Structures are given as C-alpha cells and as structure tokens.
C-alpha cells in the first residue's frame, strides 16, 4: 500500500472513530437525532480538511527541517488555531446545549475549546513527529550518499592517473625502433595502446581480474625494457588460484612504475623488478620488490599515497599496504587484499563516508 493511501485511510478512520467515540454515547443516552448525526458527519469532514491543510502547510514550508524549538512553537500555534476553528464552527451547531450550560457554567466554552485542542494535538503531534523523523533520516541518507559520491569521484581520478612522462618516453623509444626493428615497434605500439586503453577504462571499473592487471604490468615492463634494455630485469609470478581475484585497476602498474623511476633507474648498472602474487590466510598477498633504497623510493609519494587511498576507499581497513626496505638495495611493496564481497565493499564505503 502506498504512503498516500495509508495517509487517507488513517485520516478517515481516525476521525471517524474519534467523533463516533463521542457521538455513540450521546445517542445511547438521548436517542437518535438526525441533526446530531449530520453534526457528527460534519465534524469528521471538518477534522479531515483542517488537518490536511496543516499537512500541506508543513510540507510546503518544510517545517520539519526547522530546529526543534521553532518547530514546537509552530505546532502549538497550529493546535490552538485549529482548535479554535473547530470550536467556533461547532458552537452554532451545538448552540442549544451550550446556551443551557453557559447559564450554569460560564467557562464551558473554554473546556469545549480545550477538548478540541487535545484531539487535534494528538493528530498534529503524531504527524509532525513522523515527518520530522522521516526528514531527518532522508537528510542523513542524502549526506552519506553525497560523501560516497565524492569519494567515488575521487577514486575515479586516482584510478585514471597515468604518468605522462612514461607515455612521452615510450613514444620516443618506439620512434627509435621504427627503422631499427619495425616488428618490435609494432609490438610496442600494441603494448602502449593496451596500457592507454586500460587507463581510460580504469575510471569506469572499481576492480579487474588480477590476470588482466598483470598483463598491463607486463606490457609496461616490456616498454620500459625498450628504454633500459639490459639494465632492467623483471619477473612476474602468480598463484593460478589468484588469477581471478579482484584488484583495483592500474594499481600494480603504478607501484611498478614507482619502483623503476625511484629505484632501478638510480642504480648504477640497472636493476630488477619482481612481482609475486599468492593467496595466504584467505588474502591475496602481492609483493613488488625492486632495486633501490627506501629513501629515494619514498620520493614517489604521489603514487604511494594513490595506492593507500584507493585501497581505503574500496576495502576500508580490510586491506593493507606498506613499503619497506627488505635488505640492502632492495625495496619491497606489500599489498594484502581480501576477497571482494558486498560486505567488504560496504565496509569500504562506510569507511570512506566517515573520513
């Protein structure tokens, strides 16, 4: 049942029961009178109309978004005003009874007025509280969704970052190959196009298969070998069971690039980069080791911060990233990623929303 239908059902049923609660005892005591019956029907209709007008007012001017003190004043004012309207309209209909009572009880009108205010207060307070709670809940939900949207936009920017210097250097290397080794130049162009395509698609996908990410890393390393030749050695090994594990796109490529730029390229005579992926304790553990020293590797802070931020956005505290000096002239970047599930994803979003 829709909210609109529920509202009108409660309106009609509530006011009918309220008026009948007073009308039925009157009939049992004084007998049925057609005039009093019409008065009861008029009160039902009047109660529905007045409270519906209140509903339109509170929604039009968005009273539920006001601070509680200001909202309370409006609720009290509305009760007093609507109660007065009900009393003034009912007074002519009950004139004969009121005139008789007023001779003996001059304050009966105020008792009559207070009774209507009490009835209207129950309705107005119930509706206002419901609307206030609903508005607060929606505002909180929209705030969370806005934060999540901002975090997702940030994540898209992080995913799509590709070092322009790498592209420039790769094109220069390919240009040199065009006359020296045309077939190698063709292959290098294909590898570069694969990397660029994956970079463009990265902002549309939260994760990719590990095997796809490793292919991007291999294409990148092959292009770098064109530039560094024998000064760069690399190896990529992965547990076959981990090939379809979901990882953030272009993340490993960023770390490998960081290792070469701030590690291998600064080592006399070149160096190496090894990528190893395995499953341990229900986590995907990736180690990227390369020649270099941690002091110089840390100068690639943008890439490292990029990686930490992306893992935090997607996995929350379920994933970890660290970089450390494994031994002399060898730096290791370690990533631990859980199996991506709905629960992990929601945890990552909530963590991002709370930051």
Image (spheres, rainbow, N blue to C red):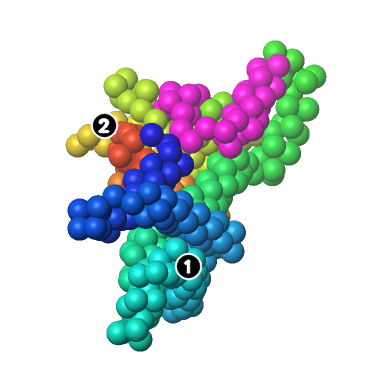
Q: Which residues are the magenta region?
A: 186-215
Of helix, strand and loop, which mostly describes the magenta segment?
helix
- The residue sitting at 39% across, 69% down in the picture is 96
Residue 134, percent across and down? 41, 55
Q: Disc 1 designates what residue?
A: 92
Q: What residue appears at the point 70 percent right and 13 percent down from the top-left corner?
A: 183
- Tell me if 328 is positioned left or right of 229 in this view: left
For mark 2, does the 10 Å Cα neighbourhood hold few (<14), some (14 to 19), or many (20 or more) residues? some
- The foreground one among 84 and 76 is 84
Q: Is residue 167 left or right of residue 104?
A: right
Q: Is residue 321 above or below residue 273?
A: below
Observer-nearest residue: 302 or 11?
A: 11
- Secondary structure, mark 1, is helix
Mark 1, residues whose alpha carbon is within 10 Å: few (<14), some, or many (≥20)?
Answer: few
Is residue 136 visible in the rendered image? The answer is no
* Picture coordinates of residue 7, whole percent (x, y): 41, 46
Residue 279 bears which disc, if any? 2
Q: Look at the image and tell me in which quarter the N terminus lies.
A: top left
């Amino acid at each position: 049942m829709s909210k609109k239908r529920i509202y009108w059902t409660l309106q009609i049923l509530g006011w009918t029961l309220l008026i009948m609660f007073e009308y039925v005892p009157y009939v049992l005591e004084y007998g049925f009178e057609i005039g009093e019956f019409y008065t009861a029907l008029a009160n039902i209709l009047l109660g529905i109309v007045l409270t519906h007008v209140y509903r339109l007012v509170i929604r039009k001017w968005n009273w539920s978004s006001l601070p509680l003190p200001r909202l309370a004043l409006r609720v009290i004012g509305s009760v007093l005003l609507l109660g007065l309207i009900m009393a003034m309209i009912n007074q002519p209909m009950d004139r004969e009874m009121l005139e008789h009572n007023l001779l003996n009880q001059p304050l009966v009108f105020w008792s009559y007025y207070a009774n209507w205010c009490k009835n209207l207060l129950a309705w107005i307070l119930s509706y206002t509280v419901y609307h206030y709670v609903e508005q607060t809940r929606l505002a909180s939900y929209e705030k969370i969704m806005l934060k999540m949207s901002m975090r997702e936009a940030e994540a898209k920017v992080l995913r799509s970052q590709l070092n322009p210097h790498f592209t420039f250097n790769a094109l220069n290397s390919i240009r040199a190959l065009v006359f020296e080794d045309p077939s190698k130049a063709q292959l290098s162009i294909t590898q570069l196009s694969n990397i660029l395509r994956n970079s463009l698609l990265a902002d549309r996908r939260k994760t990719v298969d590990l095997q796809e990410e490793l292919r991007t890393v291999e294409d990148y390393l092959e292009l770098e070998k064109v530039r560094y030749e024998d000064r760069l050695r690399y190896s990529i090994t992965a547990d076959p069971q981990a090939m379809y594990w979901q990882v953030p796109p272009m993340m490993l490529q960023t770390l490998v690039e960081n290792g070469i730029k701030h590690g291998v390229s600064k080592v006399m005579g070149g160096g190496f980069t090894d990528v190893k992926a395995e499953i341990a304790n229900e986590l995907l553990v990736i180690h990227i080791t390369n020649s270099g020293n941690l002091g110089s590797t840390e100068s690639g802070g943008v890439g490292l911060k990029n990686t930490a931020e992306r893992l935090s956005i997607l996995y929350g505290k379920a994933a970890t990233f660290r970089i450390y000096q494994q031994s002399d002239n060898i730096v290791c970047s370690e990533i631990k990623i859980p199996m991506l599930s709905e629960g992990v994803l929601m945890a990552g979003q909530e963590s991002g929303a709370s930051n």
